[in-house]
Image: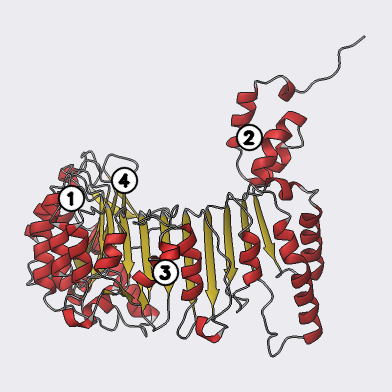
């Protein structure tokens, strides 16, 4: 009697099968592997069906079939989903040109099946991406359903055109507790901007919340203390005296913050501010003074800091300790930074390099000044000396003064204190910064017909791009061509018009002639 036929997957060690599945390239491969054997299926299913998307964009039949499968509880998505994405919901009102019959059929389907489909998922759900930007409605019922998942740890919410002040203030918004990361992106509201709902999402998770990202784009300011700090004693008594938040990101509208909110954020290590952080108009040119002073007094030592603008009290705070790992200054485009020049910016920039960088030179890894006014932040000899002390730098973004005359005449010498490109590159790439893997050099100048203006045509723009590339590639670096940095295949140099970095830079170093050269386009 011949032995039963067996697959090689039936005799491989379980650990090896698990590794094969874990590193399988893509969902399609995973869903093929699950058909190989029963053992392989047990390893592949939790990965192949970990993510589920609910969308109403692809029509009635597809939505009905997908939601019906989830509600039945028989499909693998119902069992294994840990990451749920809900997007492209039916709007609360039909579009003016939309067929009303079709709209109400889809609306009724959503009302009937959406919540049962969410509730049918097993308790393993840990992350939800909820996009309500097409719905124009807070969908309280969705939040009520999500509140029933005890393992939910990450919630990303995007809303548009929702105004808290236009709805019933007495309505109870569902409370979701246990979150460790919460991202709220609110656009299009007139005044409330989903802030009441945001507070109701934040407060119940304060005992566990480690990362909070807020983006409110309305003109109405946002009071950080109101959003973060529970008010009534019956609420306060149930929550920690200080927040567990380590990573705070504030984008969009103006945020008012002061001593109270700073002291509440005693565990803060990462702060990203792409807006104006203020406390009151009485502080004039340094409106965030109380916030930075409180951080210093409470010995709250940030590890990563991204800010739009530098102020005296911010510099005092940064000079009060050592150990900063990452620093990024500037959030506007170079042209906007030029137009909205900050009073005393040259003095502030000098103080940062002279007084702050030395305190953190042993720990700084990313360092960026690429979206700033070049008149204050382009690299001078004194600035470069301080940068070269940062031996741990992995990424450096800098701004370079590129006057229009230099665009057409590479021999032109500008009467500025800023360093010439060949000297700048050779000193940054000679191995003094041994860990440098990414260098971004961004050109800037006074806005003209080829730089920084919204109506620039392609002709002047291409002339600028070609001139900038030719200048950078014309720098002779043969004397440092064998440096540790330039011989590292992981090193990337971007001669960019902005700080965006593609996967592959547009230039590569030619060690034979000691120059960077454009990467040939395929």
Of the two numbered discs 2 and 4 on the same chain, state the one appearing first in sequence.
2
Can residue 496 be seen in the rendering of this structure?
no
Circles 3, 2 touching at the beta carbon (< 8 Å): no
Secondary element type, mark 4: loop
Q: CA distance from mark 2 to mark 4?
A: 32 Å
Quarter holding residue 410: bottom left
Q: Are marks 2 and 4 in contact (CB under 8 Å)?
A: no
In the rendered structure, find residue 428 and report the number of the disc placed on it.
1
**Dot 3: few (<14), some (14–19), or many (≥20) neighbours within 10 Å?**
few
Indicate the position of residue 514 as horizontal and vertical percent values.
22, 47
Q: Residues within 10 Å of mark 1 (few under 14, many from 20)?
A: some
Residue to which mark 3 is pinned: 232
Q: Nearer the viewer, mark 3 or mark 1?
A: 3
Q: CA distance from mark 3 to mark 2?
A: 51 Å
Towards the viewer: 458 or 246: 246
114 in relation to 170, above or below:
above
Judging by the rendered image, the residue that carries numbered circle 4 is: 491
- On the image, the x and y values in percent for residue 135 come to 63, 76
Which residue sits furthest right? Answer: 1
Q: At 68% across and 86% down in the image, what residue appears?
A: 95
Give the residue at mark 2.
Answer: 21
* Alpha carbon separation for disc pair 3 and 4: 54 Å
Q: Earlier in the sequence, mark 2 or mark 1?
A: 2
């Amino acid at each position: 009697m011949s032995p039963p036929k067996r697959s090689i997957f039936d005799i491989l060690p379980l650990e090896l099968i698990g590794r094969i599945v874990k590193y399988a390239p893509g969902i399609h491969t995973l869903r093929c592997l699950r058909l190989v054997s029963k053992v392989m299926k047990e390893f592949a299913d939790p990965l192949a069906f970990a993510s589920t998307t609910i969308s109403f964009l692809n029509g009635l039949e597809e939505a009905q079939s997908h939601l019906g499968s989830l509600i039945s509880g028989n499909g693998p998505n119902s069992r294994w989903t840990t990451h749920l994405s809900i997007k492209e919901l039916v709007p609360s009102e039909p579009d003016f040109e939309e067929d009303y019959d079709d709209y109400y059929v889809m609306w009724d389907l959503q009302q009937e099946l959406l919540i049962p489909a969410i509730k049918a998922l097993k308790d393993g759900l840990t992350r939800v991406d909820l996009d309500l930007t097409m719905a124009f409605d807070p969908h309280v019922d969705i939040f009520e359903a999500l509140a029933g998942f005890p393992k939910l740890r990450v919630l990303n919410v995007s809303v548009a055109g929702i105004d808290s002040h236009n709805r019933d203030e007495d309505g109870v918004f569902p409370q979701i507790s246990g979150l460790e990361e919460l991202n709220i992106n609110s656009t299009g509201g007139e005044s409330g901007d989903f802030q009441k709902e945001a507070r109701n999402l934040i407060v119940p998770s304060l005992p566990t919340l480690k990362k909070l990202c807020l983006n409110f784009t309305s003109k109405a300011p946002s009071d950080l203390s109101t959003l973060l700090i529970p008010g009534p004693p019956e609420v306060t008594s149930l929550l920690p005296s200080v927040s567990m938040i380590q990573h705070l990101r504030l984008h969009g509208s103006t945020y008012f913050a002061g001593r109270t909110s700073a002291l509440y954020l005693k565990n803060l290590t990462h702060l990203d501010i792409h807006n104006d952080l203020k406390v009151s108009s009485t502080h004039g040119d340094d409106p965030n003074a109380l916030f930075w002073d409180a951080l210093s007094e409470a010995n709250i030592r940030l590890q990563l800091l991204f800010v739009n603008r530098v102020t005296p009290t911010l510099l005092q705070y940064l000079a009060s300790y050592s150990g900063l790992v990452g620093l990024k200054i500037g959030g506007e485009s170079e042209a906007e930074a030029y137009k909205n020049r900050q009073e005393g910016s040259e003095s502030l920039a000098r103080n940062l390099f002279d007084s702050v960088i030395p305190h953190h030179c042993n720990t700084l890894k990313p360092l960026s000044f690429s979206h700033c006014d070049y008149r204050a932040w382009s690299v001078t000899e004194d600035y470069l000396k301080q940068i070269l002390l940062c031996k741990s730098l992995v990424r450096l973004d800098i701004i370079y003064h590129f006057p229009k005359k230099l665009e057409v005449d590479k021999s032109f010498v500008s009467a500025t204190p800023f360093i010439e490109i060949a000297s700048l590159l050779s000193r940054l790439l000679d191995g003094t910064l041994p860990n440098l893997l990414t260098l971004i050099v961004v050109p800037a100048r006074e806005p003209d017909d080829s730089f920084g203006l919204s109506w620039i045509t392609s002709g002047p723009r291409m002339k600028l791009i070609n001139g900038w590339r030719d200048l950078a590639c014309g720098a002779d670096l043969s004397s440092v061509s064998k440096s540790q940095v330039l011989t590292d295949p992981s090193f990337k140099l971007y001669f960019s018009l902005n700080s965006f970095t593609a996967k592959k830079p547009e230039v590569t170093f030619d060690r034979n002639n000691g120059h960077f050269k454009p990467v040939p386009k395929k």
